[in-house]
Each structure stands twice: as structure tokens, then as C-alpha cells.
Amino acid sequence: MTNQQNVVVFDLKPRGVRHVLPPSSLPVAKPLSPQDIKMLLMKRFETEKAGAKINAWVDSMRASSPTRIKSTASLPETEEKSSWIVHHPSALSMFEQIVAASKGKQIVMFLDYDGTLSPIVEDPDQAFMPREMRAALRDVARYFPTAIVTGRCRDKVYSFVKLAGLYYAGSHGMDIKGPSKSCKYKKGNQGVLFQPASEFLPMIDEVYKALVEKTKSIPGAKVENNKFCVSVHFRCVDEKSWAALAEQVRSVLNEYPKLKLTQGRLVLEIRPTIKWDKGRALEFLLEALGYANSNDVLPVYIGDDRTDEDAFKVLRDRGQGFGILVSKVPKETDAFYSLQEPSEVKEFLRRLVDWKKLSQQAP
Ligand SMILES: O=P(O)(O)OC[C@H]1O[C@H](O[C@H]2O[C@H](CO)[C@@H](O)[C@H](O)[C@H]2O)[C@H](O)[C@@H](O)[C@@H]1O
């Protein structure tokens, strides 16, 4: 609050960006009532709170996904990496131990899409899966029940993967469908298995349109409708405009208390506040496959993103199976093992198929 020549001007901007009007441009104001003062103070409080929220969002937008481990002064980057690898060894170098743990158990494969099966690219519509990866995936699905668990719209990811013998869990697991062609693991229902957020469809549609409108003036921003959630991409947005983008997203989200914001790789994700995520989808799929309370299963989940951590945590908490994080750099993770990039994921899938073929031939 600035007091000049009997004129009271409330500075409603967040601290740090104060402007004081020159005396000549000041309006002649009536004295303020206690009610007015209370209201203005409340507004200022709200504005400051919003400013702090945007700053926190932008900080989080700067962090990688999952959060990269910060270098400590005592540990040079190379040592930090070797120490991380000791705790999260390569799933390729640990391959024999992984398959040994599957003795007498059914391996079930869960795979994230972007950054795991397809390399990260600037345009989300061009994230095609390489042909060799499709071949490896098709073979894996012949030998093991296999599910794609993704933040994407289920139909969209199917248009990239184009394999009918798999389970697909789109919209971060909020849209689950069984294999559309005959498959030895398929149980009963072949169609949609579960859509826990179906009541949110009209709301998500509305929010998608509002976000397209609100972000159209920010160069590089791209809004993607993922059916039960919406992605706002900022990979191609200049960092100087991240706060402006976050502010637009916040202004839309403010109108929808039943939606929440999470974050992936250079993407803000808006989704229903229901207690459902990739971890719950993994549990649901294990149950659908008949392994709800079974010790005869070894689930393996491979993913690269912060949203995959929910699934890694479920596996840790169950004490069953392994999470494998795809990352070249040390990150905070609940995964047991690591792979550096999608080409290593392909190699891992191939080795799994070769091992299975060999073990079936053994007398
Ligand atoms: O769960 P996922 O399969 O990993 O999906 C998460 C998001 O993936 C996509 O965005 C990411 O990949 C894009 C293409 O490589 C990249 O441009 C973007 O920066 C990444 O965040 C997808 O477009 C999003 O809708 C998904 O939520």
C-alpha cells in the first residue's frame, strides 16, 4: 500500500513487480471504508498467492521429469552417475538375475510409450515407433501378456503401435481396453475394461477448448486432447514465456476444482482429481489377468517419466517385479533398474524373447 497526497493506491501486483503511479496520473479517490480495505487486502493476498504458485510451477517446469538428482559439491558428475548406476543397474547387465527371478512365474510386461518405445521428438503427432521396435514388441506380446500404459489418448497410441494383441491403458490408465484380436492371455471381456473417469469427458472437452483459446497467443504452445486428460506442451515455447503459459493454464484450472495439474517431460498435464494413475492401472491389469493376489507373477514396468513413478512405487510396495527407468542421467526414482534409451528397451525386449524361446526348447 502506497500513501501519497491523500491518495491511497493499493499495489495489487505480486511483490517484486511494484509500480507506483506518478502523482499527476493519480485519480482523486474517496476515502476507503474498512470494508474496501479488507477487500483490497484480500485481493492482494490472492494475487500474491497466485504469483507464488506460478513461480513454483515454473521452477517445477524447469526441473526434468522425473526430478534429476542435483549434483552435490562433494560428488563430481561422473561419480554421481556411477553411484546412481550402482543403485539402479542396467537391466541389460542384470538380465540373467531378472529372468532368474521369474522362475515359476509368469512375466507380465508393462510399457510406457513416449520416451520408452518411441524417441522423444518436438512434435507429439510425429512420435512414431521405429519398425524394429514394433517387431520386438510384437514378439514380446506373443510370449508374455503385454500392456501399453500411457498418458496419451488410447486411440492415438494405438495408431502409433498398431498391434492388436496387447492391452492398452490410455489417459494415464483411465481408459483401459483388452486385446482386440485373439490372444491366449485374454480373459472374458475383449472390449473396454475400465474407464473410471467417464463422467469427466464433457469437462475435459470444455477445458481442452478453453486451453487452446487461452494459449494460442503463446508461440510454440501446443494443447493435446488425451480424452480423459489434456496435455499442454511447452517443449517449443521460449523459456521467457513459461510463466505466461503457466498463468493461462492456472486461470483455466481455477474454474475447475475437480481437475488437477501434474507434470511430464516438458508438458503440463491436466487430469481429474480421482485417485487413479498408472500404478492403479497396473494393479487393475494384473487383476484382470488373474494375478490379483498371486505370487506366480513377475510384473516388469518400463517407463521414462514422472508419471511412471506411480507404477514403480506400486511394484516396490508389493515387493513384486521390477520397475525399469529409461534415463541417461541420474534421477530420483522408485525403479530398481535402468536403461539408457529406447534402443536399449528394444534390446531388452529382444533378449527376453530369445530367452523365452530357448527356455521353451530346453528338455
Ligand atoms: O505416458 P507417456 O506415453 O510417456 O505419455 C506422456 C506424454 O507423452 C507425449 O509427450 C511427450 O512426448 C512428445 C513426443 O516425443 C514430446 O514432444 C513431449 O515433450 C513429451 O512430453 C504426449 O504428447 C503427451 O500427451 C503425453 O501426456
Image (cartoon, rainbow, N blue to C red):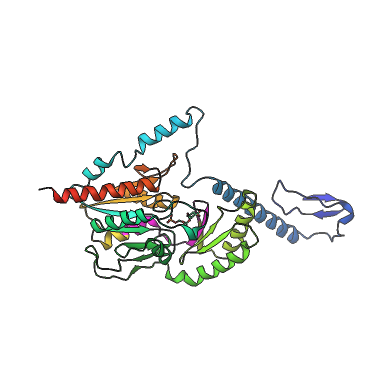
Residue at the spot 40% in from the left edge and 43% down from the top edge: 340
Question: Residue 173: x percent and y percent?
Answer: 39, 61
Q: Nearer the viewer, residue 78 or 247?
A: 78
Single out the residue that lies furthest toward the right: 24
Single out the residue that lies furthest toward the top: 74
- Please report the bounds of the magenta region as a residue range: 262-283
Q: Nearer the viewer, residue 92 or 224?
A: 92
Viewer can see residue 316: no
Viewer can see residue 15: yes
Does the magenta run of residues contain 281?
A: yes
Question: Residue 235: x percent and y percent?
Answer: 55, 52
Residue at the spot 25% in from the left edge and 68% down from the top edge: 182
Measured along the vertical axis of the image, is residue 157 above or below residue 341? below
Is residue 218 shown left or right of residue 318?
Answer: right
Single out the residue that lies furthest toward the left: 363
Question: Residue 135: x percent and y percent?
Answer: 32, 56
Residue at the spot 18% in from the left edge and 47% down from the top edge: 103
Does the magenta run of residues contain 248?
A: no
Is residue 61 shown left or right of residue 218?
Answer: left
Question: Residue 94: x percent and y percent?
Answer: 29, 39
Measured along the vertical axis of the image, is residue 347 above or below residue 224? above
Image quadrant where residue 292 sits: bottom left
Image quadrant where residue 191 sits: bottom left
Is residue 26 shown left or right of residue 200?
Answer: right
